[in-house]
Amino acid sequence: MRFEAYSLQFHKDFLLFLKSRAEEIVRWRDECVLTHRQGLVEEEKVDSFNAPYYAPSEEELKFELGKEGSFTIDRLEAFEIDWDGGAEISAVASGQRVAKTVRAVVESMIESHFGKDIMDDLFRRYSELVADHLSKSRTKHINLVVSVIRND
């Protein structure tokens, strides 16, 4: 059910973004996910925390661009990127690198909900989880880069 809600929200948000961009008004919204808790905070706080993240597919981007109509796709490419940026370092160092990157994006949001006291321990534990995962698998994410031309 949440997936459908996030998908619907993406479609609404992306349509609004395209309309705003066509009028030269830029609006951007960053959304992140808290990935792990391990007893650092009360369960009720975790249950009440919601920072949805939705990554659209190429097809969804194309569909929304076509539906809105202000732009024509000039180029659309998908790039596979290692979680840790592809560095040739140990899993532990990779886990720390990923955790630092995620922390830079979500720290203020998590801190405002859960408090400052848990931050160091939370991201230390997160780096350990990521390091363990990366020691078993090279995980990648997909970045979509789209170049559009405004229709006249």
Image (spheres, helix red, strand yellow):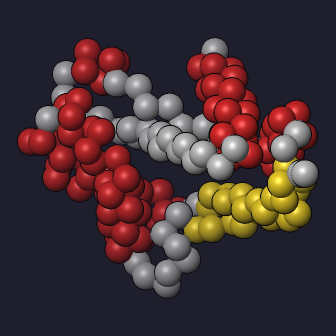
Residue extending farthest left: 117
Q: Quadrant of residue 150?
A: bottom right
Coordinates of residue 128 in the picture (x, y in percent):
32, 57
- Above or below, 151 against 91 in this view is above
- Above or below, 41 against 78 in this view is above
Left or right of residue 67: residue 123: left
Coordinates of residue 71 in the picture (x, y in percent):
85, 49
**Residue in front for this viewpoint, 121 or 90:** 121
Coordinates of residue 84 in the picture (x, y in percent):
48, 69
Q: Residue at x 26, y 52 (%)?
A: 123
Q: Residue at x 83, y 35 (%)?
A: 68
Q: Quadrant of residue 20?
A: top right
- Above or below, 44 against 70 in this view is above
- Above or below, 124 against 62 in this view is below
Residue 140 appears in the figure: yes
**How many marks do you count on the picture?**
0
Q: Residue at x 67, y 33 (%)?
A: 16
Q: Quadrant of the N terminus?
A: top right
Q: Quadrant of residue 95?
A: bottom left
Coordinates of residue 51 in the picture (x, y in percent):
43, 31
**Residue in front for this viewpoint, 148 or 145:** 148
Residue extending farthest bottom: 88
Residue 56 appears in the figure: no
Left or right of residue 106: residue 122: left
Q: Residue at x 32, y 63 (%)?
A: 100
